[in-house]
Image: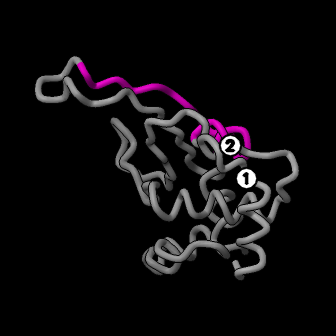
Amino acid sequence: MGPIAFLKLLEILDMRGPLIYNKKMTTELLYAYLAGIIDGEAFVGFVKRPKRHSFVFCIGVEMTDYSIPKLLQETFGGSLRPRDRRHQPGRENHKPTWIWRVSHRKARTVYRKVEPYLRLKAGKLPLSTQQLISPS
């Protein structure tokens, strides 16, 4: 994303409170914004399926703020659930978090849509993974 597009993004976002999706935001800017969240906060990789000997491509974001995981769910689908670990020893001071997660084909679709805007996680996946999620 170039400097002009970034300035346009800043104008569209409401910077007075938590970053919340604004209806004026174009799809391209939305994907660029969410790619930044995925680049900085997300897990992108494979998760072992319980009781099976296979792995599933997965993207997940865990944050204390509700608005960003909710925006990811509204944009890409997937699941959104709360997690509260304060009952665990040594975690009494932890804040409850929200987890957005998408897997299988939806995860590949999400990755393809945000891949042009990724900086840290672009090209870091093994070649076999790139073959799995690249458009045919």
Tell me the kind of residue under disc 2. Answer: Ile
Whether the magenta-drawn stretch holds residue 25 is answered as no
Q: Quadrant of the N terminus?
A: bottom right
Extreme left residue here?
Answer: 89
Which quadrant of the view contains residue 21? top right
**Residues in magenta, as a range:** 69-86
Mark 1 and mark 2 residues within 8 Å of each other at the beta carbon: yes
Which quadrant of the view contains residue 111? bottom right
Q: Is residue 36 left or right of residue 53?
A: right
Whole-angstrom CA distance, mark 1 to mark 2, is 7 Å
**In terms of depth relative to the viewer, which is nearer, 89 or 4?**
4
Residue placed under numbered mark 2 in the picture: 20
- Helix, strand or loop at label 1? It is loop
Q: Dot 2, crowdedness within 10 Å: few (<14), some or many (≥20)?
A: few
Residue 30: where, in percent of width, then height? 74, 57
Residue placed under numbered mark 1 in the picture: 13
Say which residue appears at 58% left-offset and 50% top-offset.
Answer: 104
Residue 102: where, in percent of width, then height? 57, 45
Say which residue appears at 82% left-offset and 59% top-offset.
Answer: 27
Q: Is residue 100 left or right of residue 114?
A: left
